[in-house]
Image (cartoon, rainbow, N blue to C red):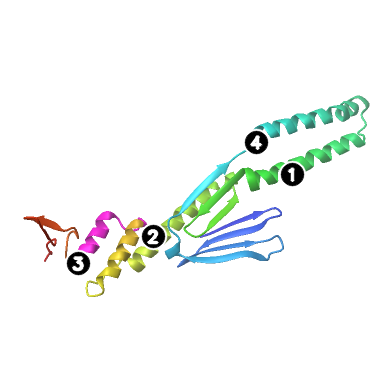
Amino acid sequence: MIFTQKQLFQGTTQIALRAESLYVCKRNPQGVATLETEIPYEEILPVKSGEHRHIPTNQLLLTGLLLVFLGYGPWHTWLTTGQAGFQLYSWFCIVVVNALAVWLRFEQQWCTFRLQTAHLAVTLAGRPWQRKQFRALVTELERRTKIYLRKEYGQVNPLGFIEPQLRRLAWLRELDVLSAREAQALSTRLTGRRSTDTLKSMGQELESPYLN
Protein backbone atom coordinates (compact mmCIF):
# COMPACT_ATOMS: atom_id res chain seq x y z
CA MET A 1 0.00 0.00 0.00
CA ILE A 2 1.36 3.41 -0.99
CA PHE A 3 0.16 6.84 0.14
CA THR A 4 1.47 9.80 -1.88
CA GLN A 5 0.82 13.49 -1.35
CA LYS A 6 2.14 16.49 -3.30
CA GLN A 7 2.19 19.97 -1.77
CA LEU A 8 2.81 23.23 -3.58
CA PHE A 9 6.26 24.63 -2.73
CA GLN A 10 6.75 21.75 -0.26
CA GLY A 11 7.43 18.75 -2.48
CA THR A 12 6.16 15.19 -2.22
CA THR A 13 5.66 12.82 0.68
CA GLN A 14 5.39 9.08 0.08
CA ILE A 15 4.51 6.44 2.67
CA ALA A 16 4.75 2.79 1.66
CA LEU A 17 3.94 -0.38 3.60
CA ARG A 18 6.52 -2.99 2.68
CA ALA A 19 6.79 -6.65 3.60
CA GLU A 20 8.85 -6.09 6.76
CA SER A 21 9.00 -2.32 7.24
CA LEU A 22 7.43 1.12 6.88
CA TYR A 23 9.06 3.32 4.25
CA VAL A 24 8.79 7.12 4.38
CA CYS A 25 10.33 9.51 1.85
CA LYS A 26 10.01 13.30 1.59
CA ARG A 27 11.29 15.08 -1.51
CA ASN A 28 11.60 18.80 -2.16
CA PRO A 29 10.06 20.42 -5.29
CA GLN A 30 13.29 19.63 -7.19
CA GLY A 31 12.85 15.90 -6.49
CA VAL A 32 15.75 15.61 -4.05
CA ALA A 33 15.08 13.43 -1.00
CA THR A 34 15.27 15.47 2.20
CA LEU A 35 14.08 12.62 4.43
CA GLU A 36 14.21 8.93 3.64
CA THR A 37 13.85 6.26 6.27
CA GLU A 38 12.73 2.68 6.62
CA ILE A 39 11.50 1.48 10.01
CA PRO A 40 11.11 -2.25 10.75
CA TYR A 41 7.74 -3.39 12.06
CA GLU A 42 9.40 -4.28 15.37
CA GLU A 43 9.73 -0.53 16.06
CA ILE A 44 6.31 0.66 14.89
CA LEU A 45 3.80 0.05 17.66
CA PRO A 46 1.99 1.83 19.14
CA VAL A 47 0.45 3.59 16.12
CA LYS A 48 -1.39 6.86 16.70
CA SER A 49 -3.11 9.16 14.23
CA GLY A 50 -4.88 12.49 14.40
CA GLU A 51 -6.69 15.02 12.27
CA HIS A 52 -6.23 18.62 13.38
CA ARG A 53 -8.27 21.54 12.12
CA HIS A 54 -7.81 25.12 13.28
CA ILE A 55 -9.22 27.72 10.88
CA PRO A 56 -8.97 31.39 12.04
CA THR A 57 -12.52 32.39 11.14
CA ASN A 58 -12.23 35.91 12.55
CA GLN A 59 -9.07 36.61 10.57
CA LEU A 60 -10.67 35.39 7.34
CA LEU A 61 -13.77 37.50 8.00
CA LEU A 62 -11.71 40.63 8.58
CA THR A 63 -9.68 39.97 5.43
CA GLY A 64 -12.88 39.54 3.42
CA LEU A 65 -14.35 42.78 4.74
CA LEU A 66 -11.11 44.63 3.95
CA LEU A 67 -11.13 43.31 0.38
CA VAL A 68 -14.76 44.40 -0.04
CA PHE A 69 -13.88 47.86 1.27
CA LEU A 70 -10.89 48.19 -1.07
CA GLY A 71 -12.86 46.94 -4.05
CA TYR A 72 -15.92 49.14 -3.60
CA GLY A 73 -14.43 52.17 -5.36
CA PRO A 74 -12.96 50.35 -8.40
CA TRP A 75 -16.12 48.30 -8.87
CA HIS A 76 -18.35 51.37 -8.58
CA THR A 77 -16.25 53.18 -11.20
CA TRP A 78 -16.41 50.22 -13.57
CA LEU A 79 -20.18 49.83 -13.19
CA THR A 80 -20.86 53.51 -13.78
CA THR A 81 -18.38 54.23 -16.56
CA GLY A 82 -17.90 50.80 -18.05
CA GLN A 83 -14.13 51.18 -17.91
CA ALA A 84 -11.86 48.99 -15.79
CA GLY A 85 -9.02 51.11 -14.47
CA PHE A 86 -5.70 50.31 -12.85
CA GLN A 87 -7.27 50.18 -9.40
CA LEU A 88 -9.63 47.36 -10.40
CA TYR A 89 -6.80 45.31 -11.88
CA SER A 90 -4.76 45.90 -8.74
CA TRP A 91 -7.69 44.78 -6.61
CA PHE A 92 -7.99 41.57 -8.63
CA CYS A 93 -4.28 40.88 -8.09
CA ILE A 94 -4.67 41.38 -4.34
CA VAL A 95 -7.64 39.00 -4.26
CA VAL A 96 -5.70 36.31 -6.18
CA VAL A 97 -2.66 36.62 -3.89
CA ASN A 98 -4.86 36.37 -0.78
CA ALA A 99 -6.73 33.37 -2.19
CA LEU A 100 -3.42 31.58 -2.86
CA ALA A 101 -2.16 32.41 0.65
CA VAL A 102 -5.37 31.10 2.21
CA TRP A 103 -5.12 27.87 0.22
CA LEU A 104 -1.49 27.28 1.22
CA ARG A 105 -2.19 27.94 4.90
CA PHE A 106 -5.28 25.73 4.73
CA GLU A 107 -3.16 22.85 3.41
CA GLN A 108 -0.01 23.30 5.47
CA GLN A 109 -1.15 24.81 8.78
CA TRP A 110 -4.87 24.91 9.39
CA CYS A 111 -5.80 21.32 8.45
CA THR A 112 -3.31 18.49 8.93
CA PHE A 113 -3.10 14.73 9.24
CA ARG A 114 -0.59 13.30 11.71
CA LEU A 115 0.79 9.77 11.77
CA GLN A 116 2.87 8.82 14.79
CA THR A 117 4.70 5.59 15.57
CA ALA A 118 7.09 4.69 18.37
CA HIS A 119 10.02 6.41 16.62
CA LEU A 120 8.53 8.57 13.87
CA ALA A 121 5.97 11.36 13.42
CA VAL A 122 4.80 12.50 9.97
CA THR A 123 2.57 15.54 9.34
CA LEU A 124 0.58 15.70 6.11
CA ALA A 125 -1.84 18.15 4.54
CA GLY A 126 -5.35 17.49 5.84
CA ARG A 127 -7.12 17.32 2.49
CA PRO A 128 -10.75 16.17 2.88
CA TRP A 129 -10.58 14.00 -0.23
CA GLN A 130 -7.60 12.08 1.21
CA ARG A 131 -9.11 11.50 4.65
CA LYS A 132 -10.47 8.05 3.77
CA GLN A 133 -7.17 6.97 2.24
CA PHE A 134 -5.20 8.24 5.26
CA ARG A 135 -7.43 6.36 7.70
CA ALA A 136 -7.09 3.22 5.61
CA LEU A 137 -3.29 3.64 5.71
CA VAL A 138 -3.25 3.86 9.51
CA THR A 139 -5.53 0.84 9.89
CA GLU A 140 -3.52 -1.24 7.43
CA LEU A 141 -0.21 -0.25 9.05
CA GLU A 142 -1.36 -1.44 12.46
CA ARG A 143 -2.87 -4.62 11.01
CA ARG A 144 0.25 -5.55 9.04
CA THR A 145 2.51 -4.79 11.99
CA LYS A 146 0.57 -7.07 14.33
CA ILE A 147 0.38 -9.85 11.75
CA TYR A 148 4.14 -9.63 11.18
CA LEU A 149 4.99 -9.62 14.90
CA ARG A 150 2.62 -12.51 15.59
CA LYS A 151 4.18 -14.53 12.77
CA GLU A 152 7.81 -13.77 13.66
CA TYR A 153 7.66 -13.67 17.46
CA GLY A 154 4.39 -15.31 18.49
CA GLN A 155 5.75 -18.86 18.51
CA VAL A 156 7.29 -20.60 21.53
CA ASN A 157 9.65 -23.55 21.95
CA PRO A 158 9.40 -25.36 25.31
CA LEU A 159 12.83 -26.90 24.68
CA GLY A 160 14.53 -23.52 24.39
CA PHE A 161 15.46 -20.90 26.98
CA ILE A 162 12.26 -20.00 28.79
CA GLU A 163 13.03 -16.57 30.27
CA PRO A 164 13.73 -14.78 26.94
CA GLN A 165 10.55 -16.28 25.51
CA LEU A 166 8.49 -15.14 28.48
CA ARG A 167 9.84 -11.61 28.09
CA ARG A 168 8.97 -11.75 24.39
CA LEU A 169 5.41 -12.83 25.21
CA ALA A 170 5.11 -9.99 27.72
CA TRP A 171 6.32 -7.58 25.02
CA LEU A 172 3.74 -8.85 22.53
CA ARG A 173 1.02 -8.63 25.15
CA GLU A 174 2.01 -5.05 26.01
CA LEU A 175 1.74 -4.08 22.32
CA ASP A 176 -1.67 -5.78 22.13
CA VAL A 177 -0.41 -8.22 19.51
CA LEU A 178 -1.51 -11.13 21.70
CA SER A 179 -4.64 -11.22 23.79
CA ALA A 180 -4.42 -12.02 27.48
CA ARG A 181 -5.76 -15.52 26.85
CA GLU A 182 -3.27 -16.19 24.04
CA ALA A 183 -0.34 -14.95 26.10
CA GLN A 184 -1.42 -17.08 29.07
CA ALA A 185 -1.77 -20.19 26.88
CA LEU A 186 1.69 -19.75 25.40
CA SER A 187 3.18 -19.06 28.82
CA THR A 188 1.59 -22.23 30.18
CA ARG A 189 3.01 -24.18 27.27
CA LEU A 190 6.47 -22.88 28.09
CA THR A 191 6.50 -23.27 31.86
CA GLY A 192 3.95 -26.01 32.40
CA ARG A 193 2.23 -23.75 34.95
CA ARG A 194 -1.11 -22.08 34.68
CA SER A 195 0.22 -19.16 36.75
CA THR A 196 3.61 -18.04 37.99
CA ASP A 197 2.14 -16.72 41.25
CA THR A 198 3.23 -18.53 44.40
CA LEU A 199 0.77 -20.30 46.68
CA LYS A 200 0.71 -20.12 50.46
CA SER A 201 -0.08 -23.04 52.73
CA MET A 202 0.51 -23.29 56.46
CA GLY A 203 2.42 -20.00 56.32
CA GLN A 204 4.82 -21.28 53.66
CA GLU A 205 5.15 -20.21 50.03
CA LEU A 206 4.72 -23.01 47.52
CA GLU A 207 5.31 -23.05 43.81
CA SER A 208 2.21 -23.18 41.64
CA PRO A 209 1.46 -26.72 40.38
CA TYR A 210 2.62 -27.94 37.01
CA LEU A 211 0.21 -29.16 34.37
CA ASN A 212 0.73 -32.54 32.71
Q: Nearer the viewer, mark 2 or mark 4?
A: 4
> Callout 2, which amino acid?
Lys
**Residue at coordinates 47% horizontally, 51% vertically from top-left?**
48
Residue 157 in the image: state x and y as whole percent.
Answer: 25, 72
Task: State the residue in front, 181 or 197.
Answer: 197
C-alpha separation, residue under disc 2 versus residue under disc 4: 40 Å
Where's the C terminus, which quadrant? bottom left
**Residue at coordinates 52% horizontally, 59% vertically from top-left?**
120
C-alpha separation, residue under disc 1 versus residue under disc 3: 66 Å
Other residues around mark 4 within 10 Å, as few (<14) / some (14–19) / many (≥20):
few
| Residue topped by disc 2 | 146
Please, what secondary structure does the residue beneath circle 2 have?
A: helix
C-alpha separation, residue under disc 3 versus residue under disc 2: 25 Å
| Residue topped by disc 1 | 100
**Residue at coordinates 54% horizontally, 45% vertically from top-left?**
51
| Residue topped by disc 3 | 191
> Callout 4, which amino acid?
Pro
Other residues around mark 2 within 10 Å, as few (<14) / some (14–19) / many (≥20):
many
Is 72 situated left or right of 111 in this image? right
Is 35 situated left or right of 104 in this image? left
Specify start and end residues of the magenta stretch as a single range: 175-188
Vertical position of residue 161 compared to residue 69: above or below: below
| Residue topped by disc 4 | 56
Q: Which mark is residue 70?
A: none
